[in-house]
Image (cartoon, rainbow, N blue to C red):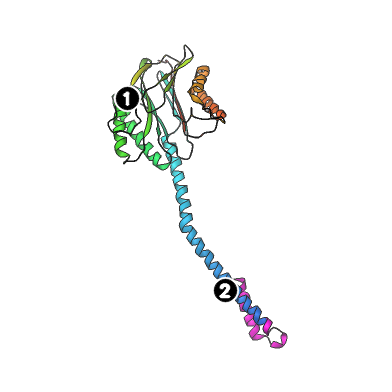
Amino acid sequence: MVYVLLLITLSRIDTHIPVSQGLAGPTFSYVRWRLAMDGALLGSATALGWILLIIFAGTQGVRHVRERTELELAEKLQQTLAPPLSARRVSYEIQGKSVPSGHMGGDLLDCLEDADSLACYMADVAGHGIHAGVFMGMVKSSARTALLRPGSLEQLLADLNRVLFEIKAGSATYATFACVRCREQGQIEYALAGHGPILHYHTHTKDVSLLAMEQFPLGLFPNAKFESRVAKLEPGDILALLTDGLPEVADEKDEQFGLERIGGILAKYGERTLTELIGMLFDSARRHGSQNDDETLILVRATGAN
């Protein structure tokens, strides 16, 4: 723009100022030509810059906005599907926490209460991102609906499996699942589908046992069979449900954090509050190694209160 204004000014000078003042001649003509060329090139460069800016805004800019929108949606989904858990009912207390490895993890945790029991569950969906989040939403809505109906957990798993197999639309998505339903007098029913064992801390003996079941994950086969089992909790006993991200944390020597270390922490500090125990377990895992997968933990304590 400056070059163009200067060119116009010199044109007026060339027209109105006498030649005797030394502004005419070959030198002045060259200056006018050079300014004209520079002005034209500058104008072309400006136009090209605007064109490139518009192209960028229509491609990379839109892509950036779309990616940012997806990240915000993923974070909101994560907060909705895997919020911190805190529930208390006569004879039981539940605390839970999930730490995703990215903006949208594949772990789900939830608890709900009906007239006869307090139930909690977790699921580990294969994959991450929005697709896994949508599948997690399907698992959560289906599980909540089923748990509000009377029936055994083996029927719950069968219904969930059939629904998820039908709605996953031919994709390879599936979910591991762990559920505990707490009833009065310390009676609990539990079921596992492709999930790691539940750790049972015994307050009287200060040791930890495993509640394990070999069953298929949900959504793999339409007619898979499932079962549930029952166990007895004494006042002070703790159940620990966890996804594989926590025990599989590895150190520099590729040694995993492992269920044995987790059980050792439960055995040593089982008298602490559930909030303190969850903090200890996650802190110990971080000291052992960096996070590589979603980490989810639910603790259930039998309080024995009436």
Range of the magenta residues?
1-27
- Which mark is drawn over residue 40? 2
User: Is 22 covered by the magenta stretch?
Assistant: yes
In this view, the residue in front, 56 or 186, is 56
Residue 190 locus on image (x, y percent): 36, 22
Q: Earlier in the sequence, mark 1 or mark 2?
A: 2
In the picture, measured across the screen, residue 168 lies left or right of residue 66, that is left
Give the residue type that dot 1 points to.
Leu
Q: Is residue 148 visible?
A: no
Most prominent secondary structure in the magenta stretch?
helix
> Do callouts 1 and 2 mark residues in contact (Cβ within 8 Å)?
no
At x 46%, y 44%, the residue is: 72
Q: Residues within 10 Å of mark 1 (few under 14, many from 20)?
A: many
Residue 303 locus on image (x, y percent): 43, 17
- Which mark is drawn over residue 200? none
Q: Which quadrant would the C terminus be assigned to in this image?
A: top left
Residue 292 locus on image (x, y percent): 50, 35
At x 29%, y 30%, the residue is: 159
The residue that mark 1 highlights is 153
Q: Residues within 10 Å of mark 2 (few under 14, many from 20)?
A: some
Q: Which quadrant would the N terminus be assigned to in this image?
A: bottom right
Q: Is residue 265 visible?
A: yes
Q: Secondary structure at mark 1?
A: helix
Can you name the residue that lies furthest to the right here? 21
Give the residue type that dot 2 points to.
Ala
Residue 268 locus on image (x, y percent): 53, 17
